Image (cartoon, rainbow, N blue to C red):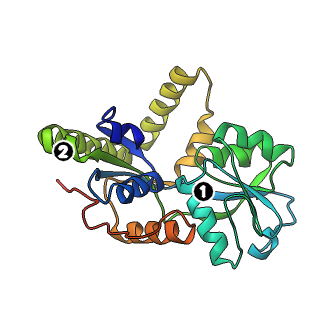
Amino acid sequence: MEAVFAGSLDLTYVGQGPALNAHFKSKGEEIRIISGAANGGAALVVKSDSPIKTPADFRGKKIATPQLGNTQDISCRAWLKAQGFHVTQTGGDVIIVPTANPDQLPLFQNGGVDAVWTVEPWVTRLEHDGNGKVFLEDKNVLTTWLASSVKFLKDHRDLAKKIADANAELTQWIQAHPDEAQTTLIAELKAETRADLAADAVAHAWKRITFTNEVSRDLITKAVQDGKDAGFLKGATDTSKLVEPF
């Protein structure tokens, strides 16, 4: 989002938390959502043998989230508040530990945290490699959407529309060809990271994700409320100009 503000990026796939923060920070003048991408795929994971059985059991525990203020971090904090916990950025009834996704698994395995609120494929990795189980699946969340700078839309609206259309076409192809899409994903990730991702793990994670180019107004309303409950969104939260449909 800072790169968009600086003019270094024109468009980006991004989570709901950073996009909303940027939209409100710029008083609605800098960021537009031109398409959806993926919903769901997030979950709160505990150890299979964890004594945590109910929400009340999280009192005094440590939960890792990917990054302070990111989508899963906000969802976690909002949920904890709804359970009656007082949570701050540095402490409270439950300790939130912002931890990069690749570092969550070893921390979870060695007992550095009691739970992790994260997104696929890390949820599946925690299940398969960390003896974890899903305590709560976060299905109703805008995990990723396609954001554009207002300047790019003004200067190159025709190109922005082509990109939004391509995103919609790709989304439809993924929906119609899940097996081929998963195979392509595994190959691309190996090319990028030099690491193999097991086909069964990808298939397991895939079931939790909804690929869609639609942007739900109801989920935007929920995202804004979660941001307020988590303490990250304050002041005016008008989203009337956020979505730019084509």
The residue pinned by badge 1 equals 73
Residue nearest the observer in this picture, 229 or 121: 229
Instruction: Tell me the quadrant of the picture where the N terminus can be found.
Output: top left
Residue nearest the observer in this picture, 21 or 215: 21
Label 2 Cα crowd, 10 Å radius (few <14 / some 14-19 / many 20+): some
> Which residue is at a point 68% across and 45% down the rendered structure image?
99
- Residue 117 drawn at (x, y percent): 66, 56
> Which residue is at a point 45% across and 66% down the rendered structure image?
223
Amino acid under disc 1: Asp
> Which residue is at a point 28% across and 37% down the rendered structure image?
10
- Residue 143 drawn at (x, y percent): 47, 54
Spatial CA distance of label 2 from label 1 is 30 Å
Residue nearest the observer in this picture, 128 or 82: 82
The part of the image, by quadrant, that contains residue 101 is: top right
- Residue 239 drawn at (x, y percent): 31, 66
- Is residue 173 depicted above or below 87 in this figure? above
Q: Secondary structure at mark 2?
A: helix
Label 1 Cα crowd, 10 Å radius (few <14 / some 14-19 / many 20+): many
The residue pinned by badge 2 equals 153
If you read the primary sequence from the N terminus, does the residue marked by circle 2 or circle 1 appear first? Answer: 1
Q: Secondary structure at mark 1?
A: helix
- Is residue 101 depicted above or below 57 in this figure? above
- Residue 202 drawn at (x, y percent): 57, 41
Q: How many marks?
A: 2
Amino acid under disc 2: Leu
> Which residue is at a point 42% across and 46% down the rendered structure image?
14
- Taking 13 as reference, is 208 left or right? right
- Taking 226 as reference, is 54 left or right? right
